[in-house]
Image (cartoon, rainbow, N blue to C red):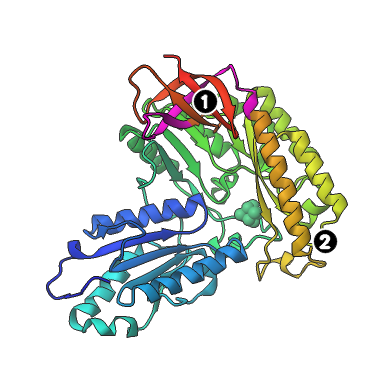
Amino acid sequence: MTSMEPEKRSIENYTIAFHTLGCKVNRYETDAVRQAFASRGFQIVTEETPADILVINTCTVTSEADRKSRQMIRRAKRRNPGAIVVAMGCQIELLKSASDADIAVGTKNRLSVVDLVLEKMGLLMTDPPSTVTKTPSTVTKTPETGYQEFGPVVSQEDTTRAFIKIQDGCDSFCSYCIIPFARGRVVSRASAEILREAEELSNRGFHEIVLTGIHLCSYGKERGEGIEALAQLLEQLDAIPAIHRIRLGSLEPNSMTESFVHKLAGIRKLCPHFHVSLQSGSDSVLSRMNRKYTAGGYREVISLLRSVFPRVAVTTDIIVAFPGETEEEHQESLRFCREIGFSRIHVFPFSVRSGTSAADMQPKVSSKTADERTETFLQLSNSLAAAYCSRFEGDTVDVLLETKDESGEFSGYSKEYLRVHVSSSQDVRQGQEVRVKVISMEQNELYGTVTY
Ligand code: SF4
């Protein structure tokens, strides 16, 4: 920690750094909290810079994420003995304690950390700095309030793509998942707020809007609305002239009705890239997972998507080595994924989360077998990604230019979420969407030249 002379320091002289573990929703929420501190005058510094206040947004989706979160909090305390360490998010929600942090909030009411920090600094103003770590930890209650409005949230990392969180929570209770316990039931944001935020961010120059949430397909569920609510929201976003591209976060196959997919097809700005969560291609494993669809039902949804988006990119998540997963079930899952032809598979070995029903399921798959199955799936993902990418060689794609390297080469993502390296003889700039003729492919990334 930098030297503290509280009675003389104004807020502008206090530095604050943020560390985020876990998913895109967590990143969004860190951005929101960062913004709230900045608006109160705190000086934001990068993760690596020693700071007066350290905020750690935790994750607990796997036991590994949980371990890392604890480790990060402990390390923050050890390396910054005088700093105020704030922990927030899913792990804290489940722990109901501050862990080793000075201040902790769960998954609701996160913006309250700003006042809690100011309160703690108020104590510092009258006490010598040595008492900082001796002041009692603060753990806020996490009332079951409705959706907490943050917006408009501007990410520090992204300058071209803006994430908008449209809902929180999940009512599904898949047998392996701790998230419904950490984030509670579904709460959705008012559509007018989302539309306002999307327009504002687009006017600020964000070219792509990504709708994110814990269970997107449940958007509006607690208001008695069905999947049409998400379709309607997309139609409204599509109609805003300032918005150029819309991308959807993870979708659930059992929610994707025929009429929903047909509505998606009518949304002109929607990227033909859908992350449709599978988890296993074996019906018996899906049933033990308490997933409410079969592999056959999943196949139908993907066929439907392909009938309306011919070049669609479909990505998914797979859990390998779920309790009781036999070699046969594993092979069944592999065969199914090969048949579907995903453009990428995110592979996760099963992780025991205490409090979920899968935690007690037996027999557990050995870690050696889990490692082997993970590796097999990663290889499959790689070969499927190569096959999908190769379909674009010689073709044209629309690329949002995001980064420029030292040699002046731009790269960005196509609508199908393929990474494309772009050379151009014309003047192009970051944040611009250009049409690119694909010349070659290397390591599942495309290379091409701007055609206009
Ligand atoms: S749908 Fe299942 S895996 Fe996804 S957050 Fe809800 S309980 Fe977890």
| Residue 447 badge | 1
Q: Residue at x 71, y 33 (%)?
A: 302
Quadrant of ligand 1 in image = bottom right
For disc 2, the neighbor class at 10 Å (few under 14, some 14 to 19, many from 20) is some
Mark 1: secondary structure: strand
Question: Image point 67% across, 59% down: which residue?
Answer: 173
* The disc label shown at residue 11, or none: none
Q: Which residue is mark 2?
A: 324
Which amino acid, by three-letter code, is at mark 1?
A: Tyr
Residue sitting farthest toward the top:
452
Q: Vertical placement of 58 versus 410: above or below? A: below
Residue 294 locus on image (x, y percent): 79, 44
Quarter of the view holding residue 359: bottom right
At which x and y percent is residue 120? Answer: 28, 75
Residue 392 falls inside the magenta stretch: yes
Amino acid under label 2? Gly
Question: From where the camera sits, is residue 330 visible?
Answer: yes
Q: Which region of the structure is painted magenta?
A: 389-412
Between 85 and 242, the residue placed more toward the observer is 85
Q: Distance between the Cα atoms at labels 2 and 1?
A: 43 Å
- List x then y, in percent, for residue 149: 39, 52
